[in-house]
Image (cartoon, helix red, strand yellow):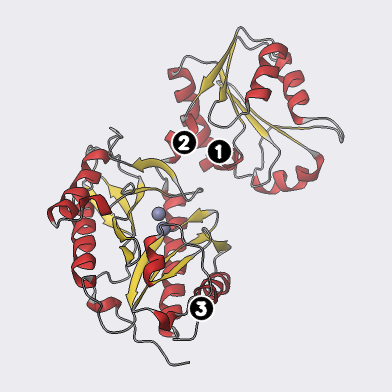
Amino acid sequence: MSNFLKRRDRLRKVIRHERAEALLVTNPVNVTYLTGFTGGDSYLLVTQATDLLLSDPRYEEQIGEESPGLATFIRQPGELLSEVTVRELNKLELKSLAVEGDHLTVNTFDGWQRELNVESLLKGSGWVEGLRAIKDKVELAAIRRAIDVAERVFTSVRAQLSARQSERDVANEIERLTRAMGGAACAFKPIVAVGPRSALPHATPGECLMGSSPFVLIDWGAIVDGYRSDLTRVLLTSRIPPKFAKVYETVLAAQTAAIEALKPGVMVSQVDQIARDVIARAGMGPRFNHGLGHGIGLDIHEAPRMSKKLDQPLVAGMVVTVEPGIYYTGWGGVRIEDDVLITADGYELLSSLPRSLSENTAPLLLG
Ligand code: ZN
Ligand code: ZN
């Protein structure tokens, strides 16, 4: 049985459990997860008995290649996807249909409520995302490759880091090397932030030079076979600045404590708290101003969100980032981020770049 059919069968259980007859999947990433089809403008209907992909002529050949055997309805040129959806679904005489409330627009939902012949139109939330949180073997292998590419890119960038390179130069180099080393693209626009700019969690790479500050924060990842990696390292590029070692060691201790607490059954809020406590004990509690991490997969941010507000237990097969940080406006920030698999009895650290401060010093080439 294909992996995709297995995933759809798992979804059928969720649909039954939620007391719906069928789910119309409109989020394109969810469609990809359930079918392998990577194009857009297509909806997937999953009922207890059948699956039907509603698509258009541009994709006919691609669907045949990526999703062999999948029942497909190809609309005529000029027909709107939402109209065809109403027409084809009305033929099935479903009593209850669920749609993806996190994705569908209010306008489409209102239109369908008028036009669809179903007794109840339900708003589902997180049904497919919940399945996606737990990775199967194929997905895990792709994530491992995405991490491997990202790590090789970083090692190469680091070895060539020069004082005259700007943040933008380094970001461009990361993008170029990611493709050269086997990635489809970067998992997101790389963040390269020197000194004070590293205090901005989403700094856009600019003209600041590597040589203008004693450290640089790099947050990057790769996509391989649709799956993403997400890593962050801070490189010390010259003499150690005041309070840097204390900040770095505190972030590393918080990250290590959180990683070591990962295992099935532990609440994500507990793990977040463990990291937060380490930073608070060092007197820098308020400086850790974001969540601990997030799931990675087909999306860069997906379930489970690692947040102090979420009482969600970890489950074997989840892949999450652990990325505490400490930030001082005007001085800079330190964040260390790794990707971790939850295993049956604990965790496996998937990323392998060294994390200690002594192993993250990178004297700049004069260039
Ligand atoms: Zn990141
Ligand atoms: Zn991240």
Q: The residue under label 3 is which amino acid type?
A: Ser
The residue at the far left in this view is 281
**N-terminal-most mark, 2 or 1:** 1
| Front one among 359 and 59 | 359
Q: In percent of the image, x 47 and y 14: which residue is there?
A: 19
Q: The residue under label 2 is which amino acid type?
A: Glu
Q: The residue under label 1 is which amino acid type?
A: Asn
For the residue labelled by badge 1, is the local secondary structure a helix, a strand or a loop? Answer: helix
Report crowding for label 2: few under 14, some 14 to 19, many 20 or more residues within 10 A (C-alpha): some
**N-terminal-most mark, 3 or 2:** 2
Residue named by callout 3: 166
Q: In the image, ligand 1 is in what quadrant?
A: bottom left
Q: In percent of the image, x 41 and y 45: which residue is there?
A: 135
For the residue labelled by badge 2, is the local secondary structure a helix, a strand or a loop? Answer: helix
Residue named by callout 1: 30
Tell me if 226 is positioned left or right of 364 in this view: right
Asked where in the image residue 145 lies, by quadrant, the reply is bottom left
Asked where in the image residue 250 lies, by quadrant, the reply is bottom left
The disc placed on residue 129 is 2
Tell me where residue 32 appears, x and y as whole percent.
59, 43
| Front one among 356 and 297 | 356
Cβ of mark 2 under 8 Å from ligand 2: the answer is no
The image shows residue 7, relative to residue 282, as above or below, that is above
The residue at the far bottom in this view is 366
Whether residues under marks 2 and 1 lie with C-beta atoms below 8 angstroms apart, the answer is: yes
Which label lies toward us, 3 or 1? 3
| Front one among 279 and 35 | 279
Cβ of mark 3 under 8 Å from ligand 1: the answer is no
Q: CA distance from mark 3 to mark 1?
A: 38 Å
Q: CA distance from mark 3 to mark 2?
A: 38 Å
